[in-house]
Image: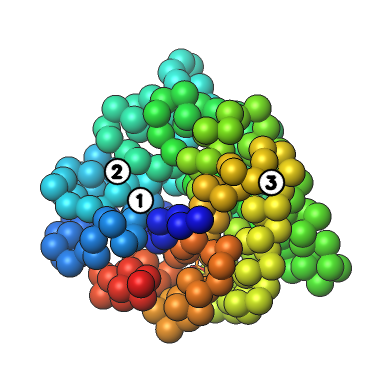
Amino acid sequence: MSRKPIIAGNWKMNKNVQEAMAFVEEVKGQLPSEEVVESVIGASAVLLNGVKFQASGSALKVAAQNCYFEDAGAFTGETSPKVLADLGADYVIIGHSERRDYFHETDEDINKKAHAIFRNGLTPIICCGESLETYEAGKAVEFVGAQVSAALKGLTAEQVAASVIAYEPIWAIGTGKSATKDDAQTMCKAVRDVVVADFGQEVADKVRVQYGGSVNPANIAEYMACPDVDGALVGGASLEPASFLELLAAVK
Ligand code: PEP
């Protein structure tokens, strides 16, 4: 089963308007073919409109880093998935560990967000991942499996097949301490196994699973060589145009 690789940069709450526009201007003419790899930048909500506009006519796709699970209403400060669709976003990253930890997002919130994202014609990049304590206790597969199952609850087979799931061990995010390629493969396969159990083999063969956690141009190739790793979600190494382009170029 061939799945198109997807490399998504997660800028987090970095870059001002000028920096974001300069980045897109620099990379947009140098992106690899969309036939080979999907190139995505996850920018903060206030930058999305500009990034989308600046990227127009190029292969660069745009991801929000969060959204609310209602389309509109009295939810001061929240980001509407309907408006994200309106401005042309392609993906929405949900369930990032920083949102789970700092903003207390639950599996139930993430599931509601996944439904809202599909309802508005967007695609979720659903993050999951265990803490160091859980990893060291040998409970990563069980823990991450429960997160994935909860996030996908009630979605259709077609929606799950179109989803992207990013396995990101919390201990590897922003730490420079990346997972071994064997751990990444084991966990991305475990994620796919949950999809097999909940939605069947055909759906699991289509869903794309990324590894994330201190991925950089020097180590991305070994992750991409793993049969169940279909791409990467990258924080730090996506901030500089040259590094982002190197990540993309490593996908063959
Ligand atoms: C992330 O923010 O999702 C991430 C994986 O960050 P980093 O690549 O910096 O570890």
Say whether residue 77 is left or right of residue 26.
right
Work out whether residue 124 or residue 4 is closer to the camera in this orientation and state it.
4
Could you say whether the residue bearing mark 1 is in a helix, strand or loop? loop
Q: Which residue is mark 3?
A: 196
Say whether residue 235 is left or right of residue 195.
left
Q: CA distance from mark 3 to mark 2?
A: 34 Å
Work out whether residue 218 or residue 48 is closer to the camera in this orientation and state it.
218
* Labels 3, 2: front one: 3
Q: Which residue is mark 1?
A: 43
Residue under the point 46% across and 15% down = 73
Residue 217 in the image: x percent, y percent? Answer: 39, 79
Residue 134 in the image: x percent, y percent? Answer: 80, 63
Residue under the point 41% across and 34% down = 122
Does any portion of residue 104 appear in the rendered image?
A: no
Could you say whether the residue bearing mark 3 is in a helix, strand or loop? helix
Dot label at residue 48:
2
User: Contact (CB < 8 A) between labels 1 and 2?
Assistant: yes
Residue under the point 27% across and 32% down = 87
**The C terminus, quarter of image:** bottom left
Badge 1 amino acid: Ala
User: Contact (CB < 8 A) between labels 3 and 1?
Assistant: no
Work out whether residue 11 or residue 248 is closer to the camera in this orientation and state it.
248
Residue under the point 49% across and 61% down = 230
- Pick whichever of labels 3 and 2 is earlier in the sequence: 2
Q: CA distance from mark 1 to mark 2?
A: 6 Å
Badge 3 amino acid: Val
Q: Is residue 185 above or below residue 176?
A: above
Q: Is residue 21 above or below residue 245?
A: above
Residue 247 in the image: x percent, y percent? Answer: 36, 72
Say whether residue 99 is left or right of residue 76.
right
Q: Residues within 10 Å of mark 1 (few under 14, many from 20)?
A: many
